Image: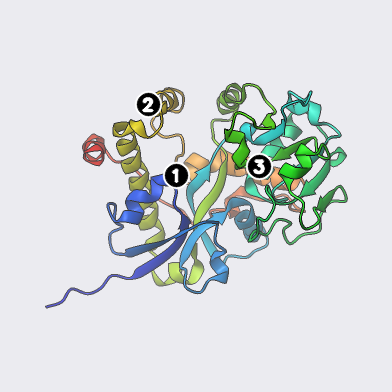
């Protein structure tokens, strides 16, 4: 007698290393056949009929929820998150060394409403800089980059403009027509001895540790979403998938602590991270991300990305059981 087939759930996700156990089938979600389509860039889940869910910009998701658009159900699982102090670049010969010195500057960035750039502008705003006094230019990091919607659906402030076709942030910064750029990813030459660029902050890790001490969170950038009709057909799916994502993350951490020779100093970084953040620097769950979610909603309004205050409770309106990390035995199995 054949066994009944499980419902197939197709997700579009970038191949973050902490998702590999789930992508490879090492970690399974009981009751579902999870199929992950690895993507080069973040998918537009709603625009792809073949997807049941996937990786979604936190900014775009929150704005949709604020507008009453509930076509996507967000899971409090931030598959991309990171400090933003490192994301401000200047030329190596620049006199700029601190965020407050960006007042009145000409700054390029990779996308106006983007989650990461919103968090970076929040740092600049917190340093006492008037964002309306900055000349902002939006464009690709490097020439030839396509496939990204950079301006959003809402009217841009008068001090924000799109770069003409053919221009890039790297080119304009190198030419001196920009004073700084905001980018979540470093240009390729940044990893060469002859790089023309450097971080604005000489010791961005110290600034990031201070940020953690002050806020208690690492900013969330992208989260996992599911289409509403898929959730309505399978109400148990969100909690099951959230638990699977949690298991995948801890399985990955166990393997990473065992196989540390992927970079020369990975063991040091893992040890330092555990000392500072505890066992999980990227927690999943509504309660554990409540402070971060509230801070992000506040920034979207304060920066004029959204015209009205946003109720953080509207971001994850449905209760989720807080995911439970695997116990010692599961961690040991993951590392085996």
Side of 246 where 300 appears, left or right: right
| Position of residue 110 measured from the top left corner of the image (x, y, whole percent) | 69, 48
Would you identify the image quadrant in which residue 154 lies?
bottom right
| Between 241 and 42, the one nearer to me in the picture | 42
Residue at 41%, 45% (x, y): give it: 17
What residue is disc 2 on? 267
Q: CA distance from mark 2 to mark 1?
A: 24 Å
Q: Residues within 10 Å of mark 1 (few under 14, many from 20)?
A: many
197 horizontally vs 262: left or right: right
* Mark 3 surroundings: few (<14), some (14-19) or many (≥20) residues within 10 A: many
Neighbour tally class for label 2: few under 14, some 14-19, many 20 plus, Cα within 10 Å: some
Between the C-alphas of marks 1 and 3, the distance is: 25 Å
Q: Position of residue 296 (x, y in %)?
A: 64, 43
At which x and y percent is residue 283?
45, 40
Position of residue 36 relative to residue 258, above or below, is below
Q: Nearer the viewer, mark 1 or mark 3?
A: 3
Task: Give whichever of discs 2 and 3 has the lower sequence position.
Answer: 3
């Amino acid at each position: 007698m054949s066994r009944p087939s499980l419902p197939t759930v197709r997700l579009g996700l970038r191949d973050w290393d902490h998702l590999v156990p789930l992508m490879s089938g090492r970690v399974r979600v009981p009751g579902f056949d999870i199929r992950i389509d690895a993507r080069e860039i973040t998918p537009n889940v709603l625009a792809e009929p073949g997807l049941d869910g996937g990786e979604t910009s936190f900014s775009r998701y929150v704005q949709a929820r604020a507008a009453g658009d509930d076509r996507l159900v967000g899971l409090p699982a931030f598959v991309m998150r990171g400090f933003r102090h490192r994301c401000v670049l200047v030329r190596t010969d620049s006199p700029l060394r601190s965020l407050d010195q960006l007042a009145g500057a000409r700054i390029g960035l990779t996308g106006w409403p983007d989650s990461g750039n919103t968090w970076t502008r929040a740092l600049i705003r917190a340093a006492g800089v008037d964002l309306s006094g900055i000349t902002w230019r939006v464009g690709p990091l490097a020439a030839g980059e396509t496939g990204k919607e950079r301006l959003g659906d809402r009217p841009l402030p008068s001090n924000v403009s799109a770069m003409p076709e053919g221009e890039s942030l790297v080119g304009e910064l190198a030419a001196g027509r920009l004073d700084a750029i905001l980018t979540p990813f470093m240009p390729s030459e940044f990893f060469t001895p002859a790089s023309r660029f450097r971080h604005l902050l000489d010791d961005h890790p110290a600034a990031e540790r201070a940020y953690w001490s002050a806020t208690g969170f690492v900013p969330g950038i992208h989260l996992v979403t599911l289409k509403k009709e898929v959730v309505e057909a399978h109400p148990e799916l969100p909690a099951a998938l959230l638990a699977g994502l949690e298991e995948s993350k801890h399985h990955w951490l166990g393997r990473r602590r065992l196989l540390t020779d992927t970079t020369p100093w990975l063991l040091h970084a893992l040890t330092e991270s555990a000392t500072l953040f505890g066992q999980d620097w990227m927690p999943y769950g509504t309660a554990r991300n409540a402070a971060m979610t509230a801070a992000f909603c506040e920034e979207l309004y304060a920066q004029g990305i959204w015209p009205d205050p946003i109720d953080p409770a509207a971001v994850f309106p449905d209760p989720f059981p807080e995911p439970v990390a695997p116990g010692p035995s599961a961690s040991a199995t993951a590392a085996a």
